[in-house]
Amino acid sequence: AAATRYEAESATISQGVVESNHTGFSGTGFVNYDNVVGSSVQWSVTAAAAGAATIVLRYANGTTTNRPMDIAVNGTVVAAATAFGSTTNWDTWQSKTITATLNAGTNTIRATATTANGGPNVDWLSVDAGTTPPTGPA
Ligand code: GCU
């Protein structure tokens, strides 16, 4: 199935700000996480059917230090301290992919910084909620 992109600047931000002072983002900006443990962005995403989904998070980390985040789906951490390593500079974005099980309908996906450096800058999250069943012969 096609992935749906959800911009970080349109999500629910706790301890972070929307900025646009680096290049290469999509939409109108990205989220600069506050440099604290617990800063987070939470997206509300939709899945047509329950099941495994591929979740991609687009981020930049211009430091040389990993900025791990816990990824929670519907309130449960499914990928603890996921690494968001250096992308060389703040204008260079990379994708981090995880897989998780979603419910049919609305789900929350939250990315929460686990170190005092906070999270990386985050541009967007995308969700590909699995494959579309083939259409049978008419
Ligand atoms: C710099 C950079 C920000 C980044 C911040 C950080 O200030 O310009 O985009 O968020 O470092 O270390 O988190």
Image (cartoon, rainbow, N blue to C red):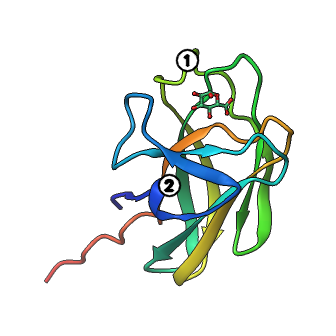
Q: How crowded is mark 1: few (under 14 residues within 10 Å), some or many (20 or more)?
A: few
Up-down relation of residue 71 to residue 47 (above or below): above
- Tell me where residue 68 sits by quadrant: top right
Amino acid type of the residue tagged 1 in the rendering: Asn
Per the image, the residue denoted by label 2 is 8
For mark 1, give the secondary structure.
loop
- Tell me where residue 137 sits by quadrant: bottom left
For mark 2, give the secondary structure.
helix
Ligand 1 neighbours mark 1 (CB distance < 8 Å):
no
Instruction: State which quarter of the image contains the N terminus.
Output: bottom left
- The x and y percentages for residue 14 are 68, 61
Tell me: 126 left or right of 66.
left
Up-down relation of residue 45 to residue 53 (above or below): below
Question: Residue at coordinates 79% horizontally, 69% vertically from top-left?
Answer: 76
- The x and y percentages for residue 35 are 76, 40
Q: Residues within 10 Å of mark 2 (few under 14, many from 20)?
A: many
Quadrant of the rendered image holding ligand 1 = top right
Amino acid type of the residue tagged 2 in the rendering: Ala
- The x and y percentages for residue 135 are 25, 75
Report if residue 126 is visible in the image: no
Question: Residue at coordinates 66% horizontally, 45% vertically from top-left?
Answer: 33
Ligand 1 neighbours mark 2 (CB distance < 8 Å):
no
Number of labelled discs?
2
Return the mark for residue 127: none
Per the image, the residue denoted by label 1 is 89
Question: Residue at coordinates 13% horizontally, 83% vertically from top-left?
Answer: 138
Kindly report the distance in space between the C-alpha atoms of the residues bearing marks 2 and 1: 19 Å
Tell me: 83 left or right of 44.
right
